[in-house]
Amino acid sequence: MPVADAQKRRQIIIRDAEIETLLRDYTAPIFGAAGVASRDAQVILVQDREFNAFVASGRRMIVHTGTLVDAKTPNEVIGVLAHETGHLAGGHLENLRGQIARSQAIGTVVSLLGIAGVAAGALSGSEAGARMGSAALSMGPGVAERTLLSYKRAQELAADRAALTFLTGTHQSAQGMVVTFQRFADQMLLSAQYADPYAQSHPMPRERIEQLETAARKSPYWEAADPPALQLRHDMMRAKLVAFTLGGSAVERRYPRSDESIPAQYARAINAYRTGGIRAAIRQVDALIARVPNYAYFHELKGQILLESGKAKEAIAPLRQAVALAPNPGLIRIMLGGAELAAGMIDEAVTDLSRGLDEEPLASIGYRQLAMAYQKQGRVADAELASAEGALIDGDIETAQNFARRAQAKFSVGSPGWLNADDIINYESPTESN
């Protein structure tokens, strides 16, 4: 797992070429059916053991690692993604914000009427009038809450219907979505402290599940199964996440040595690396490569182990092989550039880091490494601009603008570097511009 960037609220965003490629393959047909351009929508993976997925600001869909670990089939994940795409395509987040404002206004009006009633009752000396005003005052928040919950339920039903349309349109079953929702409907019977966030944020009464299953069974694709190759990729993803995020005991429990499958061997190799067994990890990765020579991410893992073990020169060959084999190699190319930088191959590092960032422009670690490479080349202005771009992605606006000012002073007025620096200097965060 090459990159994990710390974010606000102590959330960790996971960047991983293998997992992101699989999620793109899951979402591409759904986004197409929904009329959502892939370039405008972004699935962000957050390290969190809880099962949860939701649409955030703009076109961002947040998925917890726990969702991918707990989902046994690709179809279960695809069903959740289809439902969330229904929210995204329907503009539900933006509409919900407007409804919240309206609900607050309703509550305020009712409360104000209550205040007026209390005052009028007191002035007239009417005890009954005062009691009526007090009742209206206590009703205000309740009216607002009921209005909002009713609207939220309508959104959930609309997202269900949209998801069924997207899945049918892409010849996929909705069984996975029904299975997932049934699981969380059962969770609603438990204490809230044991329920996953998805169950709490997506109310799932039995009648809703029954309506969903009845409609889903009418699809000619209800019995459609996930292709075996896709199931294997899903299992590989789960093994990787278990090993990287849940630790050794979870690996031993889920992937005992009696399990000789490729995902199990993958999980054990990662666990060996994470627990300090570097030689054992390399042996196990080499065995995986022998079994599946053209799987890019085994070569990537070998390169990562070598790089993070201080063997940068030895990491370059497997990382180059991974770049050659991966369908979306941007993040791996950035790791390759980092290995070349550590090995003193500065020109090669600049080339690969620049190409990697062209493919993955939101990988802030790439800009930090590129800044170091530029510095070693004596390209101070470029180094400061790269530092500014990395800081901007990390949300450190003040640092980004300080670096941008320093870089701009060194560029010719009107040059591409000067203009890029100027954009950062004049950047306003969404909270500042509102």
Image: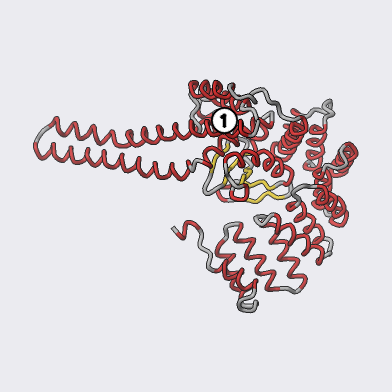
| Residue sitting nearer the eye, 273 or 199 | 199
What's under tag 1, amino acid-wise? Leu
Residue 360 in the image: state x and y as whole percent: 69, 54
Residue corresponding to mark 1: 164
Q: In the rendered view, tell whether residue 231 sits above or below residue 63.
A: above
Q: In the rendered view, tell whether residue 359 sits above or below residue 380.
A: above
Location of residue 105 (image quadrant): top left
Side of 427 where 302 appears, left or right:
right
Determine crowd level at label 1: few under 14, some 14-19, many 20+ residues with C-alpha closer than 10 A. many
Residue 312 in the image: state x and y as whole percent: 84, 56
Location of residue 384 (image quadrant): bottom right
Secondary element type, mark 1 = helix
Q: Residue at x 25, y 36 (%)?
A: 137
Q: Residue furthest left?
A: 124
Q: Residue at x 64, y 79 (%)?
A: 412
Residue 7 in the image: state x and y as whole percent: 59, 50
